[in-house]
Image (spheres, rainbow, N blue to C red):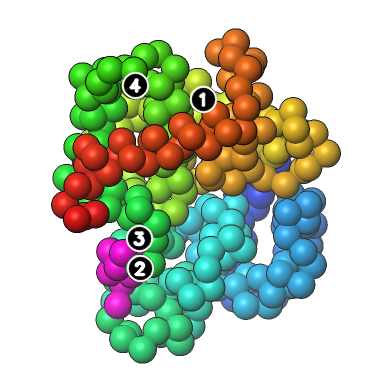
Amino acid sequence: MARQDEIDRLNDLGRQWGELDDESKKNNKELETEIFKLIYKLYSYKYNPDDMADFFIKFWYKYDPSIAKLSYYIKYFMDKNKNKIIGKDEGWHTQNKKKTRDGSLDAPLANSQVEDKDNTLKETIDDPKSEDIYYEISKDETVVQIMSLFSSIEEHLNGKSNNKKSILYKKMFYTETISDLCQKNILNENYSHERELIESLKLDFLDYYMVQKCRLIIELQNSELKRLSEISEEDLNDNNEAMIPLKQGVIKTYLKKYENMIVSDPNISDQRKKYKQFLKDNIFNSFYT
């Protein structure tokens, strides 16, 4: 069975589990065992046993399938900073809030993790000390700006920087940035310009590193990245999931296979610096002055 099929199976089993009442859950150890075995099969390559045990002890019985798919729930609590756990008592609940996927900009931060119980994830994200330079992109008007910028990128490049190679790199790194913001739920399916956002991405590159073919923000949120061994010739023995920013080997392998380009690590590092400077110059001038 393909990995995505197994993830779909896990989500279906999670839905079945979530539909049971508490008494039925106690008497349905067979279903629970099947779910646990599948979780270990899918994620033991990535997470150590202690982390997985911690997940089962703290978060498993608080899972609510009406808020998120099980695969995304697992990914959130295993990957994200524990200081940003959302919901009552470190679980996914919807007390005094409309039901939202964990990570909603309106969801409350865990009471046990913050002094101000009214803080929200959005307020934390909007603190420039809490994120890298891309936190500003979470603001709706900034997303519109950056979409417009990359939809007509040639008009914003001058001299030597206005060439196919420079444009290619910037579109690739921009695609990384947007997919990362979706994975962190800084951008979610409530964003009003979803179609334009997706169309502004370099989709063949996105398809190269994402497991799922993502043409919706919610798909970007829920899909895993492919394993490094699948997408990097320099990491053939590394079965860990790729992470953003993508490793140099991933970029080099993609460019070699699909753009007929042989590049070096310094080339990529230099282009990343130019991409960040491009954003600063065209989007974030006021932020950096």
Q: Which residue is mark 4?
A: 161
Q: Residue at x 45, y 26 (%)?
A: 169
Mark 3: few, some, or many residues within 10 Å (few <14, many ≥20)?
Answer: many
Q: What amino acid is found at the position of numbered circle 2 in the picture?
A: Lys
Residue 23 quadrant? bottom right
Which residue extends farthest top? 260
On the image, numbered disc 2 is attached to which residue?
129
Q: Which of pointers 4 and 3 indicates the residue nearer the eye?
A: 4
Q: In terms of secondary structure, where does tag 4 sit? A: helix
Q: Which numbered dot is residue 104?
A: 3
Mark 2–mark 1 Cα distance, whole angstroms, equals: 30 Å
Tag 2–tag 4 contact (CB < 8 Å) = no
Residue drawn at x 35%, y 68% as measured from the top left: 129
First of labels 2, 3 by sequence position: 3
Answer with mark 2 or mark 1, whichever residue precedes in sequence: 2
What is the C-alpha distance between the residues marked 3 and 1? 27 Å
Of callouts 3 and 1, which one flags the residue occurring earlier in the amino acid sequence? 3
The answer to whether marks 3 and 1 mark residues whose Cβ atoms lie closer than 8 Å is no
